[in-house]
Amino acid sequence: MSEEPPQGANNRMFNGPGGYRGAPKMVLGASPPPVTITKVFDAWNEMIENENQSLRDRVADLEKKVHEQTDEIMCLRSTLADVLRRISTIEGARALANNHAGGRATPTKDTVRLRHNNSDSARDVSKRASSYLPGRSPSNTQIRGAHEASKPYNSSPHLRVTFSRRGVHYQSTSSLYSDGHSSSSVSPAPSPSPTQANNPHPVHTARHTTPSPSPYASPARPHQLGVLNKRWASTSDFATPAHHQYHHLAPSPTPTNSQLARRPNSGSLHNLNHLRSSNSQLNLSRHGAKEAQYNAEEGIIKMYLRGRPINLYVPTPMRETYVPNGPSSSPPAKLKLEWVYGYRGRDCRNNVYQLPTGEIVYFVAAVVVLYNVEDQMQRHYLGHTDDIKCLAVHPNKLLIATGQTAGHDRRDARPHIRVWDSVSLNTLHVIGISDIERSVACLAFSKADGGSLLVAVDEAPDHNMSVWDWSRGERGYKLLETKCSADQVLAVDFSPVDRSTIITCGKNHISFWNYESGMLAKRMGIFENRERPKYVTSISFTDAGNVISGDSNGNLLIWQRGGNTVYKMVRGAHDGPVFSILVQKDGGIITGGKDGRIVEWDRDLERTGNVIEIPEQYGSPRVVTSGRGSQLVVGTTRNCVLGGTFTFPLRPVMQGHTEELWALAPHPGHHQFLTAGYDRTCYLWDTMAHTIVWSKDIGEHAQSAAFSNNGEIVIIGTTSGRWFVMDSETREMYSQHQDGNEPIQVLKFSPNGQYLAVGSRDNNIYIYQVSEDCRKYTRVGRCQAKVRRARYQSASSVGHSSFVTHLDWSADSQFLQTNSGDYELLFWNAGLCRQIAQTSQMRDVEWATQSCTLTFATLGIWPEGTDGTDINTCAKANQMDLLATGDDFGKIKLFASPACQQRARCLEYGGHSSHVTAVGFLQDDSRMISTGGRDTAVMQWVVSSNSSSSHR
């Protein structure tokens, strides 16, 4: 029988002299020993907590190793891509050297596409027509007229001739751009397909063959893709064979090139040429414009613009042999895009990234620029045909998606997304052609699953959001689409940890979307008792999956992962909207705001004290992204890209204009040029260093500019009728003059440097005498319309009745020829400021320049059925018989000079997304400069001789 424990020992063990005697007996009605049970539970919980912590640590270590290995793989792939690009650059340089040594370019790479102007209906000047149209071949060239059948054009190895009832059609078997969508010489050419290798006409065959898929895309690529049919050939037309199959947009009742390629019995090159010729014939026959009429006896050709006749006088040596519809010469040179100045940050977000190869990728106009700052080299993706609005980089850092807006002609310039390879610049997929209504506002790849999905938001009134399996098929596969918000959407992004979570933000909202089983569930963000901002301007994710948002009040908010309520708030992070939030790899956070500051925070959103103040001249930080090491790359609201750290100040990597751009003046003695526009700023650019020599704020909207003949003085014309005389080196203002209250449209010095002609929008041309080394200007007179008209005078002999658009001096500095807004061509005695009524006397005058678009020498630059305002600018090379034009459709065309045959042969180039306002050649004709109007882009083109495309 057990021994009773002593009184009061109920809550403890009894250990007497005899040792342990067992547990104490429980007294009836007594409470259990709580101390002992609590200790047991505490020990148990501690053990579980330790196990959980150990498990979490092990999982965190595994995740860290996975991320490190992923980064290593990414770096290896990027390094390999960079090595391949550099090897291709070396090979391309060797091939180019061999071509120069042999005196002729390789027919399959550097030959030129010959093209005739196709007509188009009148369009809004502010929007160019882009190039998509189902059922048309983009490479058709055509010359009409039965007399051409006897011409020996088929002797050229680069032209094929197809005869039809209506005439002869000349086909080019070559591609204009040796690097396809890339206009940079460093871009590698894709490997030819097996079909190419065995085909005696590789370029034609290449348009139907299927390239090897990109090795960087995780999903499998389709085996056969379509072809994009275009009306106006953009730079994407002149692609290497491996690029074109990704561009088919819509089915056509007429078989397309890709459909011909799929037919085993229709691969004949002759059949394909015949089909293209038929399509070209249809293109020219659609327009009912009146043909030009030639009076051989008087040597007058009468052309029509919008039904208005314009008489042009044929030079005496050509009167006997001139045929208006005769064959025209091919341009003696071609262009290659070398450099693009500018960046679009004023109204776009999240559009600057640094790739592992060291290139900074961003866009302006219709060009995506890949800029290697260290090597001072640019490559260009030219697949788009209108304004690019957004950009997203795939998690593998090698694939890029870009979205464009709709053009004025909705049939041709439909908004869409292009997924392309940043190494080869091959287009992989064209997505959303028939699904996006207005423009692609924002894009994002999924992250948690390796980038298999792509989300896009349309700028249409409903702001529809669509989720795509982008790698499924040639056009991707739309998984779902839903209305996102009635208000503007500024950003969209996938969660980096939850594959099914998508966040959107914009005006009056932040939305949390959950994608499951083909459905999207939406939850609006709840601000509770906090002030609701008018705009949620930016979003980002922490490494734990929490959402960080910035708003128009300057506040930062943290939203708990999986929830839609605010977890933490930082008031007054910026004085104004928060434009950008960058979460770094170590968890640190960097924000940029409208107040011009870049602020660094730790992972708990506590200030570290590091702040960057961006100078006002560069604007506010629109986007902040990570560069190499601790460097930051910043895109600003004033279209600048900056680079630097918190320790070293930010410096401009790229600068550009911020408003509509009109003035262009090449320097007469150096490899420099000046631009100016409505942002009141003048820039002098160096074409060799690709940098700004100087800039100056003139305080007014600039419309025109001109250098003196010695290059020491530059004249800037403004929209208020005022023009400034400025030193081109010191930027010192010598004087200013006022001629009317309308914009100064054109400024030009006479060849002998003694006169300055000022063309105004008030219909007048003001003539000034120049003295004191171009520093003093004395008005000689004004070429203007007379108030009274004599009965015997015609309407064309009383001066311009509309604003002056272009003017040229004669080589002897005695005469002027001028164009006006109502399609007039008038001639003037500059010294007397009198109009020359007998225009036939001017037929043999030699002109120092050719900027007038309505002359006999420019007859062939006008497409059939064109509007007189379609061509904005024209310039002749200084030493070559080469003529360049810029039009309302964002196209630059090269012609042989003089272009006096109707629908003259030309080479066509794209890149601008707005009307091209000016083109000009440098003094040695080594480069040509073009300026876009509202796209604010300045493009620099290399001019290279093109002996292989010369007319035979």
Image (cartoon, rainbow, N blue to C red):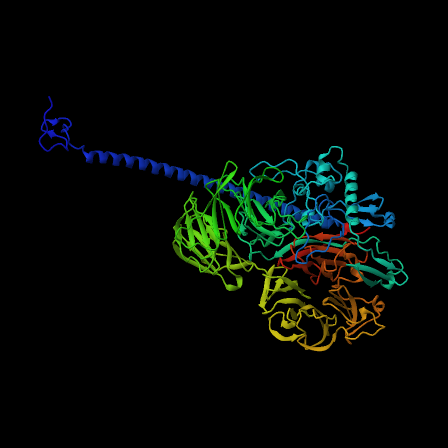
Point out residue 865 in the picture as x, y percentages from the top left corner.
77, 54
| The N terminus lies in quadrant | top left
Compared with 855, 589 (above or below) is above
Residue 299 shows in this picture: yes
Along the viewing direction, whichever of 135 and 482 lies nearer the viewer: 482
Q: Is residue 614 left or right of residue 730?
A: left
Point out residue 404 in the picture as x, y percentages from the top left corner.
61, 49
Q: Residue at x 76, y 35 (%)?
A: 266
Q: Is residue 489 left or right of residue 794?
A: left
Point out residue 161 in the picture as x, y percentages from the top left corner.
81, 44
Q: Is residue 128 left or right of residue 347?
A: right
Residue 629 shows in this picture: no
Residue 670 falls in image quadrant? bottom right
Compared with 65, 801 (above or below) is below
Point out residue 626 in the picture as x, y percentages from the top left corner.
49, 51
Compared with 706, 45 (above or below) is above
Along the viewing direction, whichever of 943 and 849 lies nearer the viewer: 849
